[in-house]
Amino acid sequence: MSSDLEQDNALTSGLRSLAAYSFPKRCVCCGRVYQNIEEFVTQTVPCGLSGSGFKEVTEEDGEVVVEVFRNCACGSSLMEFCGDRRGHSDDSRKLRDRFDELVVMLQDKGIAVETAKVELRKLVNGQESVLLSTYLKDLPDI
């Protein structure tokens, strides 16, 4: 059985990899960096004819996803997904597997499964998780 220190290291490593998945988001044209979804929405403008830049999409499995289309200050179009988007690539499967592993690790620390999922989703979406910050406070660059 792994020691508590090994489990903590695995947990913090996994949290770091999830946070890195979506944000920060970098514009490939000008290099501007958006640290989280809030910066992404407030520091860009809607693009296209839809007005808001938000588009609701129902995927094959019935999940509703919001696609956010925005223009960077340089004029380049950017897009981010909001919601529970399920990709089918190897990277997507690895991310889901890692997410599930982290839920179990947090559950082992006494956190309810649904709470763990909500807090991990906050982290993935660039939001602050006060609960998870307990485990991340000693880590640089997250």
Image (cartoon, rainbow, N blue to C red):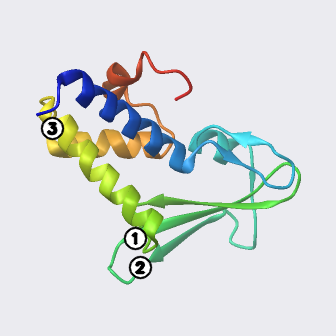
Amino acid at pointer 1: Val
* Residue 70, quarter of the rendered image: bottom right
Sequence-wise, the earlier of marks 3 and 2 is 2
Q: Is residue 103 left or right of residue 44?
A: left
Residue 81 location (% of width, % of height): 53, 61
Tag 3 residue: 107
Sequence-wise, the earlier of marks 1 and 2 is 2
Amino acid at pointer 3: Gln
Dot 1 surroundings within 10 Å: few (below 14), some, or many (20 or more)? some
Residue at figure coordinates x 74%, y 73% from the top left:
49
Sequence-wise, the earlier of marks 3 and 1 is 1
Judging from the image, what secondary structure is the residue with disc 3 in? Answer: helix
Q: Cβ–Cβ below 8 Å for labels 1 and 2?
A: yes
Judging from the image, what secondary structure is the residue with disc 1 in? Answer: strand
Tag 2 residue: 59
Residue at figure coordinates x 44%, y 70% from the top left:
87
Mark count: 3
Tag 1 residue: 64
Task: Give the distance between the C-alpha atoms of the residues marked 1 and 2, in whole angstroms.
Answer: 6 Å
Residue 19 location (% of width, % of height): 48, 41
Residue at figure coordinates x 40%, y 35% from the top left:
13
Q: In front: 10, or 56?
A: 10
Amino acid at pointer 2: Glu
- Which of label 3 and label 1 is nearer to you? 3
Q: Is residue 86 left or right of residue 115?
A: right
